[in-house]
Image (cartoon, grey):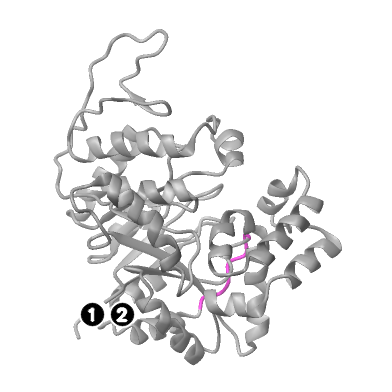
Amino acid sequence: MIELATEIRWQDRRFEVPMERILLSERMGYDAVFTAEGYGSDCLTPLAYIAARTSRLKLGTRIMEVTARAPAMAAMSYQTLNHLTGGNRVIAGLGSAAPMACEGFQGRPWGNPVKRMRDFVTLLRQGLNGHPLDHQGEEWSAPYRGPGAQGMEPAAIGLDVMSPTPIVIGASGPQMISLAAEIAEGWMPPGWAPGVMQLFAPLLEQGFAKAGNGKGLDGFSIWAHVDMLVDSDVRRAMLPFKEYVVTWSALQRPFIEARGYKDMADRLAELIAAGSGEDAEARVQAGGNLLEGSLWEEAIAAVPDDYIDDGWLVGPIERIAERAKPWFDCGLTGLVLRYGPQLNHDREAENLDAFTAVAKAAGKAPAGA
């Protein structure tokens, strides 16, 4: 049976942990809750709060940005969470920030994301396994051996290893997807729809082959997300997700093309190249649109209704529950349910009945049943 999870928004100006929804999800048989991060709330602090108020849900990051923290600090954080929860509840979901976040916000060079991820996972795994951190990479190294180094020996985290912590990598490009299959216990795609698994399987197989030892899909987790919005008007509910697709079309392009919408991807790229400008990302951060005027309207019109209907869950609750069913048998091991568009600082009032309906459709048993 597929695992279900919910996720906490990072975009809100006023951060709140949606405990009513999280506690409901635990009662309804959900398996995990994930946190995210960008320019708002961080992904680790909320998990400690949730750990104190839940007893069964797995707690994961989706994703922790590997540009923002040294691997040693990440390993300490995850191990601390392991101790707070009693073990076997933590998932270390990792990913790369965008260049603007990496260089403009975090003050780190963008460098080579694939090499950085390999270095980071090597050091993180050493720390999570209780070993001294000892790896000299191009992007992350420990101990420091550069100019002025004082020759320190490798050091290990002082906490006992309570349980294994699976490492799952968020990846959209082909090299990073294969790397996830090679060095991690799972993959978190930034986009998904039923039917695309066959198109990404070769990239995963490349990574499994490089890892050797018979590694394959068996025991390898794939966590994707789907956003829901309850509305009696299906087409009205599609609009904010069309806006999301336009804004994040560059990141989503591999998945847009995998779903057979290359012409849409090309058209969006043309419109964005024509009108986004250097301040586009800052404008989006401030809550504005990626494009302005008629270019924005053209971009929205370029996203077909079918693209949204197959990749999101919109409409009345009964429709959402029915259209969720293909997601339960499409190659995923885990599905993250989010509510409303994840585009701006305005949180949509959540319809908790939608989370309950999807759990029932997936065959989840409520706690105590």
Find out whether the residues at labels 2 and 1 contact each other: C-beta distance under 8 Å: yes
The residue that appears at 40% across and 84% down in the rendered structure is 325
Q: Secondary structure at mark 1?
A: loop
Position above or below: 195 against 166: below
Check residue 327 for magenta coloring.
no
Q: Rate crowding at label 1 as few (under 14), some (14 to 19) or many (20 or more) other CA atoms within 10 Å.
A: few
Q: Which residue is under mark 1?
A: 367
Out of 170 and 9, give the one closest to the viewer: 170
**Residues at marks 2 and 1, CA–CA distance in whole angstroms:** 6 Å
Q: Residues within 10 Å of mark 2 (few under 14, many from 20)?
A: many
* Image spot of residue 292 (x, y percent): 82, 58
**First in sequence: mark 2 vs mark 1:** 2
Q: Quadrant of residue 322?
A: bottom left
Of residues 275 and 13, the one drawn nearer to the viewer in this rendering: 275
Quadrant in the picture for the C terminus: bottom left
Q: Which residues are magenta?
A: 344-350
> For residue 268, what is the image quadrant?
bottom right
Residue type at mark 1? Ala
Instruction: Write down the residue under mark 2.
Output: 28
Tell me residue 91's x, y (percent): 30, 54
Q: Amino acid at mark 2?
A: Met
Where 43 falls versus 19 (above or below)?
Answer: above
Image quadrant in which you'd find residue 360: bottom left
Residue at 35% in and 81% down: 359
Residue at the right extreme of this rendering? 294
Number of dots carrying numbers: 2
